[in-house]
Image (spheres, helix red, strand yellow):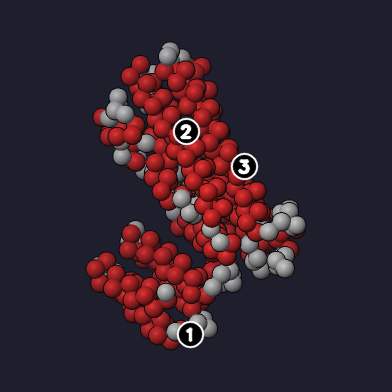
Amino acid sequence: MRRIGIGLVLFGVALAQGFKEDLRATVEPLLLGLAGGTEVLAEAAEAYAGGPTTEGLNRLRLLWLAARRPWEELEAFAFGPVGEFDPYLDTWPISPEDLKRTLGSPAADLPPEVRGFHALEYLLFQEPARTPEAARHLARLARDLAEKAAALRRAYLDYLEKTPEEELKEELYAASLELAEELFSEKLKRPESPYAQASAEDYRANAQGLAKALALLPLPGLAWALALDLERAVAALPSPLEGAWDDPKVALALARARDLYAALGKAPVGRAERRALLWLRAFREEYLDEGEVDEGLEALEGLKAALAGTPREEEALKLVEALEAKVRAAAPKEEVEPLVKALEDLLR
């Protein structure tokens, strides 16, 4: 029998279904909202390209905001095929200079830095596409976004169908953990949709998606309470958030995200070795890819907790201690990579 925690009652998940059915029932409306919202946006952009007007531009802005919301909720479910599509949907930051330089180019020929939600955001809010050439390019980018969103929907539902339930639980846990970490380490420290001044709306959707994701997992009561605390704190953020980073409400939301991240790191979802590998992946992303020392050390703390009681705990902890020393000394990637690889090999 599937374990039922208090969080399932709090969040109103259908208790009679299995995990995979619950997951699909939660994610499919978000995928449909993304695909449908971007399709409406693309059709409106194509109409706008036929005769740009202020009224048409304002409508596109509203449609952009509406299409973006389900995507931001989906960040809590960002696993499986999402990694393949994410660069073309949501690369940030973009390159405004390259975006201007590539006006008129086919969308399929463009790199991620000039495609997706944020390229459209720039052309709608920062330097509105009022000329015929810019309006046509806006329409091409909107159509490209809609096609990618529709393809993601198909690929994601196929992935859910074919992937074993336990693996999906582990992937959902990892995605939730990653989003909680990203909220306090990045999102709540800088804007994500600055041209539209919609960062607060992005983060509210993130928190709501995170609550939906966590409601599907067998987690302790503390995690549920912290998820609700985070959702309330993010809901109270000033809007627009841009220019309000010193507001105490931002600091409170950041602290709530950090607390949730710490609690999730101790949550027994999936095999211990798998959880350890997820923390190691977080370390790789934070330190090796981003150069973030504090976030890298926090990932190693989570890794140590995940290693507790595993068959090769003692051997693995020696490698983790060596990693910590390298990180505190701000060692270059070339010195750290072999230790990470050794840990990965040990845990697999």
Name above or below for residue 210 compared with residue 280. above
> How many neighbours does mark 2 have within 10 angstroms: few (below 14), some (14-19), or many (20 or more)?
many
Relative image position of residue 313 (x, y in whole percent): 46, 84
| Any part of residue 81 in sight | yes
Mark 1 or 2, nearer chain start: 2
Mark 2 vs mark 3, CA separation in Å: 16 Å
Circle 1: residue type? Pro
The amino acid beneath tag 3 is Pro
Q: Say which mark, if any, is on residue 146.
A: 2
Which residue is situated farthest in the top direction here? 51
Residue at 53 percent of width and 27 percent of height: 40
The residue located at (59%, 72%) in the rendering is 268
Q: Is residue 283 left or right of residue 34?
A: left
Most extreme residue toward the front is: 162
Q: Return the disc, 3 or 1, that comes first in the chain's sequence.
A: 3
Q: Which residue is mark 3?
A: 29
